[in-house]
Image (cartoon, grey):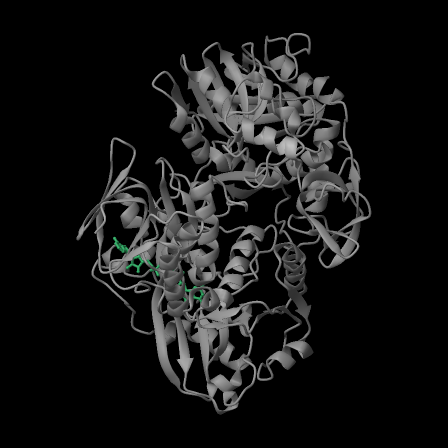
């Protein structure tokens, strides 16, 4: 066995082989894939092989779409049959809300590149004459997908990987991994050791155990899943065209034609089971091609419904039941990208629909590993989207929920309650008593709005009964003063002789020169792509306070600590410090009586911070906010947060202070045209495309990503961020909608919302630079004129913030 490689991939299932193929195609031929049994002998061989284009998440859809374009061509590329069945798929809807979801996905399908149509019961019947369509009001028909034979496709990709130069070693088990002082890894196997620069964990159901060897936790629970295959059906004999794969929320599953038989798979809503629950939740090391005993009773209630929909299946006997294991993560997306805390240790695991995702995740992870960035936004799969809060209990609770609700329609506003609450501030219960309706962000409970008792949100894509509630919260902030618990922000103290040089190297804007100065700045990759957005306050010559969004806590910690020398100390203050936003024209009047500090603009200017005492509590007050009003972020010890809140509420009563939540923040920031990290600012683009050159200071000296950003500026861009008003009536931009110029797709929306103070529906999107006029956005199937604006619709010159 060779003793050195550029990269070692552990695991020869769809995910590991998909990556080996694409790494080799990208030019990394010194790649070794190690499989303990035969290729596909984990979860891959027994999968039903469905490859849907239709998926809610815009970036996941790009991953699926790529797989669906590669599998049909694999045989031509590799000479080995891949078993592709391009029969298309139909997802059924029985409610108007589901149909709106279809329309939303159909809109972004145009950007992704797959064809999707919303069709009626008659058209569904034409495509599948045996389906009982009672109660069905529409179908989402995708004709560029289908199903694939998992073993054939995996082996064809393996053949391709070998042809491109990768090495695949079977019947060899990795037993340990050592991190060497050089930063390389020693991968220990039962056939000898390999030293390598990169290790990829593609170990499927074993992934959690493999990552433990290098101290990385992997939030995965392995779940049992069953499908059955019927005896051959006379009706399918001699059919010219294969039926589309049917997906049906009412049956919590899928059904399709399998040669001349029927195949039905069910994600039971209750009674679901963790695989190998009796032995810690993962298979024995010598397990290969393992299946569990079939348990029809467990899936019977949904199976009966499926048989009512496809009565011809009910007449056929059951030929076999497949009960196998699938890894699930807390949010159902795979873990693809750098593992937290370690350089060059990559995750490529946790795939619940890994047949559909294997090629796509392989392609985009290979780009990330080889070039430093992927061409698509990878946040939805980045392993660092979970932190330590995603412990085994939390992961198990969420994974069960994810499994049981695989076919649930993910309408906006839907909350998943499993595993919650996880991270809370001392204000969790008090704000709940005031009507806070929470959402979960990086394990934190964060208020999204405040509702009267007994209120129930109507979940739908169109404006709903939360609209007026958010309008009132926005009015409070614009006209009086609002208060919000935003403690979920990630917060770091970065200090020491090397702190300034570290932050200067990592970020694109000029650091504040004087103590108390605040800068908004971005972390770039070597390629100039945007990897993070930080607010940095200088506390002293050698000390800084770094803030970033809740979801970036783990990533920011890695970004800081990877580059830090011995002369820098990084302390994560996220849990130690709470944070209240107090914003609105009356903010100063509310806070003044609580402090001796002079809050007037002459002594406490906009974009500056001071350590002050408020209601007797030491507070780091930063005069910044994301809502575009006079206001402060008040950072205080978490233990004092409730006392601080009570004092501010009491002082604010005379000024009409009101609680507000995250939905109001979105509406308010849209009026100020403030970009959002993860929507407008992503790893796909540079500050040039994002029209954010005011945050790019190339003359400050060298920093990471400077040269690449300069090169993009010199060359020109093919897409550019625009902001504007949408002629929307009952639904606003959500993100992912196509931007059209005539019949041409010229761009994609990144986010949007309704500005309640201005009465405007607003959106951000990326469009071709020349396409600025005659634009329309397709919202839920309807074209809405989109007028590009040159600046924010609220407080153009920031007079209110500077007041
Ligand atoms: C009944 C059923 C139906 C399914 N249907 C579908 C479907 O229709 N569509 C779909 O997209 N998905 C489906 N899936 C899910 C799909 O099977 C998985 O998502 C996918 O196979 C995961 O691939 P993987 O490469 O991550 O894992 P695996 O295929 O399990 O591969 C991991 C490999 O790593 C190897 N390995 C582990 N540890 C070591 C070690 N230490 N040393 C060497 N090798 C090691 C294992 O032997 C294994 O071969 C289904 C799953 C089940 C159970």
User: Quick one: 344 or 157, which is closer to the camera?
Assistant: 157
Figure quarter occupied by ligand 1: bottom left
Q: Residue at x 59, y 38 (%)?
A: 685
Quarter of the image with the C terminus in it? top right
Where is residue 224, by image quadrant?
Answer: bottom left
Label tally: 0
Q: Is residue 502 above or below residue 404?
A: above
* Viewer-closest of 352 and 575: 352
> In this rendering, does residue 501 appear at all?
yes
Identify the residue at horizontal 38%, vertical 57% (top origin). 161
- Residue 125 pos. (x, y %): 64, 80
Residue at horizontal 48 percent and vertical 9 percent from the top? 541
Question: Residue 694 appears at what percent x and percent y?
Answer: 66, 24
**Which is more toward the observer, 156 or 456?**
156
Location of residue 741 in the rendering, given as x and y in whole percent from the top left corner: 78, 51
Q: Quadrant of residue 664?
A: top right
Q: Is residue 272 left or right of residue 750?
A: left
Q: Is residue 393 left or right of residue 493?
A: left
Q: Position of residue 160 (x, y in %)?
A: 40, 60
């Amino acid at each position: 066995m060779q003793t050195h490689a550029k990269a070692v991939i552990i695991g020869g299932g769809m995910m590991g082989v998909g990556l080996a193929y694409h790494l080799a195609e990208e030019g990394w031929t010194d790649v070794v894939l190690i499989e303990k049994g035969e290729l596909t002998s984990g979860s891959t061989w027994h999968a039903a092989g469905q490859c849907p284009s239709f998926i809610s998440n815009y970036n996941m859809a790009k991953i699926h779409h790529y797989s669906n374009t590669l599998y049909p061509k694999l045989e031509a590329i590799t000479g080995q049959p891949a078993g592709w069945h391009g029969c298309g798929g139909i997802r059924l809807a029985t409610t108007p809300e589901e149909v709106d979801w279809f329309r939303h996905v159909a809109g972004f399908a145009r950007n992704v590149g797959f064809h999707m149509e919303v069709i009626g019961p008659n058209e569904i019947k034409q495509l599948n004459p045996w389906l009982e369509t009672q109660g069905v009001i529409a179908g989402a028909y995708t004709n560029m997908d289908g199903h694939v034979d998992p073993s054939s496709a995996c082996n064809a990709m393996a053949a391709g990987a070998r042809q491109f130069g990768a090495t695949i070693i079977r019947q060899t088990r990795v037993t340990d991994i050592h991190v060497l002082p050089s930063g390389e890894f020693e991968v220990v196997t039962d056939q000898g050791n390999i030293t390598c620069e990169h290790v990829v964990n593609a170990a499927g159901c074993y992934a959690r155990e493999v990552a433990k060897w290098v101290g990385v936790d992997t939030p995965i629970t392995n779940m049992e899943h069953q499908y059955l295959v019927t005896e051959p059906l006379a009706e399918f004999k001699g059919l010219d065209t294969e039926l589309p794969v049917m997906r049906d929320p009412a049956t919590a599953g899928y059904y399709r034609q399998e040669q001349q038989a029927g195949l039905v798979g069910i994600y039971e809503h209750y009674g679901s089971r963790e695989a190998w629950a009796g032995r810690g939740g993962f298979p024995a090391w010598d397990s290969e091609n393992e299946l569990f005993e079939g348990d029809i009773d467990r899936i019977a209630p949904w199976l009966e419904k499926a048989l009512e929909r496809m009565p011809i299946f009910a007449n056929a006997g059951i030929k076999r039941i497949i009960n196998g294991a699938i890894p699930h993560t807390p949010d159902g997306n795979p873990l693809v990208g750098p593992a937290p805390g370690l350089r060059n240790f990559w995750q490529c695991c946790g795939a619940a629909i890994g047949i559909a995702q294997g090629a796509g995740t392989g392609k985009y992870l290979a780009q990330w590993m080889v070039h430093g960035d992927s061409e698509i936004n990878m946040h939805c799969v980045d392993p660092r989207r979970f932190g330590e809060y995603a412990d085994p209990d939390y992961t198990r609770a969420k994974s069960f929920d994810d499994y049981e609700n695989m076919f649930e329609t993910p309408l906006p506003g839907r909350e998943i309650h499993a595993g919650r609450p996880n991270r809370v501030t001392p204000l969790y219960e008090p704000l709940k008593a005031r009507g806070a309706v929470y959402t979960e962000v990086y394990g934190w409970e964060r208020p999204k709005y405040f509702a009267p008792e007994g209120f129930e949100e109507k979940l739908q894509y169109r404006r709903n009964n939360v609209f007026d509630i958010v309008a009132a919260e926005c009015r409070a902030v614009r006209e009086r003063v609002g208060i919000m618990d935003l403690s979920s922000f990630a917060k770091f103290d970065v200090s020491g002789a090397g702190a300034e040089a570290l932050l200067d190297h990592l970020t694109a804007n000029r650091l504040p020169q004087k103590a108390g100065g605040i800068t908004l700045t971005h972390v770039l990759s070597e390629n100039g792509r945007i990897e993070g957005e930080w607010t940095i306050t200088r506390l002293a010559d050698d000390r800084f306070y770094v803030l970033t969004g809740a979801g970036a806590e783990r990533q920011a910690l890695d970004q800081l600590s990877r580059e830090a020398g011995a002369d820098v100390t990084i302390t994560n203050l996220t849990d130690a410090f709470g944070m209240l936003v107090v914003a609105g024209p009356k903010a100063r009047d509310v806070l003044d009586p609580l402090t001796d500090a002079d809050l007037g603009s002459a002594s406490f200017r906009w974009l500056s911070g001071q350590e002050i005492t408020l209601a007797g509590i030491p507070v780091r007050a930063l005069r910044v906010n994301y809502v575009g009003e006079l206001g402060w972020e008040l950072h205080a010890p978490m233990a004092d947060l409730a006392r601080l809140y009570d004092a501010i509420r009491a002082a604010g009563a005379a000024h009409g202070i009101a609680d507000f939540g995250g939905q109001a923040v979105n509406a308010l920031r849209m009026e100020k045209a403030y970009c959002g990290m993860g929507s407008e600012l992503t790893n796909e683009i540079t500050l040039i495309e994002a029209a954010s050159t005011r945050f790019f200071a190339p003359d400050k000296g060298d920093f990471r990503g400077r040269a690449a950003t300069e090169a993009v500026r010199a060359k020109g861009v093919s897409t550019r961020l625009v902001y504007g008003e949408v002629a929307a009536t009952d639904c606003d931009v959500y993100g992912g909608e196509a931007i059209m110029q005539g019949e041409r797709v010229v761009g994609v929306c990144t986010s949007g919302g309704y500005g309640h103070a201005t009465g405007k529906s607003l959106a951000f999107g990326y469009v071709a630079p020349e396409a600025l006029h005659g634009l329309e956005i397709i919202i839920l199937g309807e074209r809405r004129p989109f007028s590009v604006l040159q600046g924010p619709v609220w407080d153009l010159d920031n007079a209110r913030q500077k007041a």
